[in-house]
Structure formats: structure tokens, C-alpha cells
Image (cartoon, coloured by chain):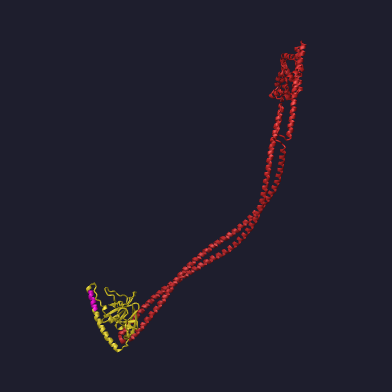
Chain colours: A red, B yellow
Amino acid sequence: MNMNDSTQDQAHAISISSSERERRLKFVRFTAKDAKLLAEMLDTVSPKANAIVDDFYDNLSQYPELLDIINQAGSSVERLKASQRHYLLDLFGGEYGENYFMRRLKIGTVHTRIGLGPQWYLGSYAGYTRQIIPLITKKYRFRPKKMDDTIGALNKIIFIDAQLVMDSYESVTKQLDKAMVSYTKFVDEVTGGNLTNKVEIPSNPDLARLGIRLNQMTESLAEITNRNEEASNGLAVTVNELLGVISEQSAGANQQAAAVNETTSTLEEIRAISKQTQEKAEALGEVADKTRADGELGVEIVEQTTQGMESIRDQVQDIAQNILALSEQTQQIGEITSSVNDLAQQLKMLSLNASIEAAKAGEAGKGFAVVAAEVKDLAEQSQQATVQVNGILQEIQRATDKAVMVTEEGTKGVDHGMNLVEQSGSAMKNLTSAIREASIASRQIVAAVHQEATGIDQIAMAMREINEAARRVVDSTQKTKSSAETLGEMSEEMRSSIKTFRKS
Amino acid sequence: MRKDSKSNYFDGLLSDSESLAVLNRRSEEMAKEQKLHDDSQIKEDFIHFRLGQKDEYGIPYRIVEEVISVSKITKVPCTPSFIAGVVNRRGEMLSVLDLYHLLGIEKTLDKPNNFDVVVIRSSSSLVGIRVDDLIGNDEFEPNSLTEPLESDRQDNSKFVLGIHQGKITMLDFEKLLESSILQVNKKID
């Protein structure tokens, strides 16, 4: 049989004191003589040991549940046969002291551990006696007394064995009861929420395994409880945060709704302003069109004025040329007058000489002297006339010079005027083009303001949609808030239920 | 021009003029005495002209040959300032006098294109007088002439017959031509 250390320890635990051993041997009247008789049988039994063990297991194999127990214990029939042979021969070892008792208790303990009940164990002795008693009777067939004594010794040692087996079974049962009480108490405490205790591990390996498992289970439970607590704490925190976030979200959504309302009203104002702008731009466009027409008329007038000024300049230049011609003719008249003057001078000279000659002629020349005097008067009158003509001519000359100067001034004035008119014409053209641009710009402004109005309508529509969406957000936020509050209540319940566990 | 020939020329001219002047003076003196005896109110023609800016002069007709107008007076070198020069008078050379210095008159600066010259018949020769303006002719009464003022510029009253109508100085050309002023006896070094 498989004997591990824990089994040996267990055997020691239920060890029997030497006095108890003596008492038990005495009670069945097992003496040294019995031990000697049994030892004398060893040589006889030993050759038959294998056959006895084979017979034992042939009988055993008729009960499959027994084989199952053996298999579950991790053993096999071959290994059991070896142990069984050893066990059988140990009956005839001749030594039945403390060590023998220990070996026998251990056998019982093993049987108890693997669940092979005492009914099977004790019953098996029937098989041994059935095989061994014939060997005794055959050996001592001629010595009946020794045969009876030997059979008696065999019976005694078998009953000693049966006692020891029963002891071990009883010991195991006691251990089981004790462990049962301990485990039940432990489980009761765990059920009550105390996860801090640990069960005491008994020496019985199976019970110890169970205790270890129980302890592991409790630790796992404590760990799970810790985790649950942490999780529920975290959940509570998260729910609080969620509530805060929802509050902020709700406030933000409310602000958004208010801002959208403000924006919508602002948009209305902008639309009113843009309508005014449009009207003003249209009025500006009309004014610009009218002004442009006036400006184009002005440009035409300026062109006509330029043409008129040019004809005036031509005329003034004609006048200047005519005056110059007149001046030249006046100079010719002057020359002629000068000639006339010379002639008059000569005539005067002639008249003087005539008078001188008349004087020379004396009385006879008196009549001629009168003629000479008349001629002299004529000459002087001619001279005076030429002087007058010269004066007039000089006045004419001065007048023509002045006229020429005036015409030159006039030409310059006309040039200056033309320059001014051209400047004003270019200014008018610039003004007209500027007005044209202004007209185009005003049309563009009107178009732009139309587009702006359309855009504002679109923005207003979008703002209404945003408003609607914001309201929906507020509604859903309220729903989320109530859900989060429910969640918070649930986490609170969870936390209070976890608090019933004591973990340390 | 040689010095000897020039001196001879002037000597001849002056000697000739001197004799002519003497003759003229004598004849005029005789004529005057006659006229004065005849009629104290007799009128006489004269050539009325201007010298300088404003001074008016007169020369009686009896010594006037004619008046001419010349375009050019040719200057003669080495002559006194009262000789204006010579002019071509119908192919004959005529000496022309400038009376400005003699009469103490400011000379006109402007140079006209034509010069009026009064040709004087003195003794047997003719001499021209350059005038600035020939005003004409008029009559004067020799007995009605007023005496010239002594203070009138320099002492030239010896060439003056008298003042006609208070403004026309009647020149006494016989005296003038006889005057030693006109006698040039200067030798050129």
C-alpha cells in the first residue's frame, strides 16, 4: 500500500501506548508462546504466500466497486499484491511490539483514507484463515495440541489486527467529526460576513485539502468582495462625476439655448439693418445713375465748350492778323505821309526861295512875292495836315499795337480757358467714371445685401434647428440625469451590502 | 597837305573876304542912309529860322541869296569850330558856317537827315549858314528893332541889328563877316 509521510504522521497521531498494547495483548491472551508458534509457521506459509494473495485478489476482483476504489486511490492490483504478500508474512514475523502495531495501524489508516470500509477489511480475514488454517492442520496433523495452539495464536493475532483497524477507522471518524464541526463553524462565520478567519488545517490530508480549499475560497471571496467594494466605490465616484458632468452639460445646454436665442434676436437686428442697407444702396444706385447721366451731359457740354473756345481762338487769331495787316498799312500811310511832308518841306523851301527871288526883283516881284507867300501857306498847311495825319496814324498805331497785345492776351486767355475747360472736361470724365463705378458698386452692394439676407435667413433657420437640438439635448440630459441618479442609488445599495462583509 | 600851301589858301581867302566885307559895309551904309531918309517906317523881308533848341533868328532878305537843303556837309580838316564844312551847291563848293559858338548857343545833338542852309551873299562871295529849322519869312521894321540886352549871354551884341517883336534876333551879317573872330590866322604845327 502506498504510504506517504502524511499517512505516517497520522498513524503516529493515533499511536497506542505500550501499556495499552500490553493490555490489548493480555486481553486476547496473546503470549510469547503464541508469537513463537506463529513464527514457526513462517516457513510453511511463505512458499504459499503468492498463492494465498492471488486467491485473495481473485475473490476481490469479483467486486468491481472495490477495484474502482483501489484504482481511484492511485494504486494497482500488482502493487497491492506485493504489499499484501508483505502484510501476510508480517503476521508470521514473530515480533509483535510497537513497530508491528504501528505498521498495522498504518494499514488501517490507509484503508480508511481510500474509503475501503471495515466490512471488506475484516471479511478479507476469512479468506486468509480459509487458506492458512489448512496449512496449519496439515503441518501439525500429527500434533493436535500444537495445531490447536497455533490456530489459536492465529486467531488472536487476527483479532489484534481487527482491533487496530477498528481503532484507525474510529480515529478517522473522530477526526472527520472534529473537522466537520470546525468547518461548519467556519462556513457559518463566512455566511455571516466574516471573511477574516481561516480554518485550522487538520492532519488528515483529505480534510486538510478541504480546509485549504475553504481558506482559498474565503480568500477569493474576500478578494472579490474587496474588488466589488472598490468597484462600487469607483462606481459611486463615477456616478457622482457623471452627475456633475450632466449638470454641467445641462447648464451648458441651457447657456447654449440662451446664446442661440440671443443670436437669433441679433440676427433679426442684422436682417433689419441689412434691409435698410439694401434700400440705401438702391437709392444710392438711382442717384448714381442720375448723376452719371448729368455727368455725361456735362462732358458733352465741356466738349462743345472746347470747340467753341477753339473757334474763338481762331477768330481772335484772325483779328490779330487783320490788325497786323492794318498796322502795316498804317505804316505805309505813314511813309506816304512822310513823303508828303518832305514834299511840303520842299515846297516851303521853294516858296521861300521864290519870295527871296521876288524880293530880289524888287517892285516887279511884289506880285510874285504874294504868290510865293500863298504857296508857302499851302506848304505850311500841307505840313500841318501831315502832322495831323501823323498824329492820327500814331494813335492808330498805338491802338493797333494795343489791339495786337489785347488779341495776344485774348489768345492766351482763350488758351488758358481751353486748358481750364479741358481740365474740367477730364475732371468731368473722371467724375463720370467714378460715378459709374459708384453705380456699379451700389448694384453690387444691392446684390451682396440680397445674398446676405438669404444667408441670414439660412443662419436663422440653422439657429432654430440648433435651438431645437439644444432643447433635445436638455431633455436627454434630464433623462440621463435621472438614470445616473438611479445608478447612484444602485451603487449605494451595493456598497451598503458589501459593508456587511468584514474583510480584516 | 602841305603847310605852305594851306597857309596860302587861308591867307588868300581871308584877304579876299576882308575886302569884300569892306565893300559890302560901305554899300549897305550908303543904302541905309538913303532908306532912313526916305521912310523911317519902311518894312523889310527876312528869313526866319531857328538855331539850337529855341533861339529864333532873322536875316534880312537883301543879303540872302537863297535857302537850300543839303543832305551832307563835308567836314574840312584843320578848320575852326565855326566852320561846319563845305557843301556842293549846284556844282560849286560853298563854305558853311556854324554860328553856335559865335552866338553862344547850345548845339543841338540830333543830326537830321537834311541840313537847311541859308546862303548869304556877302560882297562878292557866297557863304552858307547852317540853321536847325527854317521857320519861314516875315517882315520887320528896322527902325522898330529893340536893342539887345547886354547881359544876354556873351558879348555878341555887335553882330545883332536888334530884336524883332521881342523874340527874333535880327543878325547883322556884315559885321559878323567882317569880324576878326572869323579870321583864322592859325598855323598848324
Q: How far across and down, in percent of the image, does residue B125 sit?
A: 26, 80
Residue A498 within the segment the image draws in magenta: no
The secondary structure that most of the magenta stretch takes on is helix
- Image quarter where the C terminus of chain B lies is bottom left
Residue positioned most to the front: A19
Q: How many marks?
A: 0
- Image quarter where the N terminus of chain B lies is bottom left
- Look at 40% across and 74% down and name the residue there: A331
Residue A157, relative to residue B101: is it above or below? above
The answer to whether residue A269 of the structure is visible from this angle is yes
Q: What is the quadrant of residue A263 in the picture?
A: bottom right
Residues shaded magenta: B5-14
Residue A384, relative to residue A60: is it above or below? below
Residue positioned most to the left: B4
Q: How far across and down, in percent of the image, does residue B57 sit?
A: 33, 80
Residue positioned most to the bottom: B38
Q: What is the quadrant of residue A360 in the picture?
A: bottom left
Q: How far across and down, in percent of the image, does residue A51 sit?
A: 73, 17
In the image, A337: left or right of A460?
left
The answer to whether residue B84 of the structure is visible from this angle is no
Q: How far across and down, in percent of the image, does residue A349 sit?
A: 34, 80
Between A465 and A404, which is closer to the camera in this rendering?
A465
Residue A420, relative to residue A66: is it above or below? below
In the image, A220: left or right of B98?
right
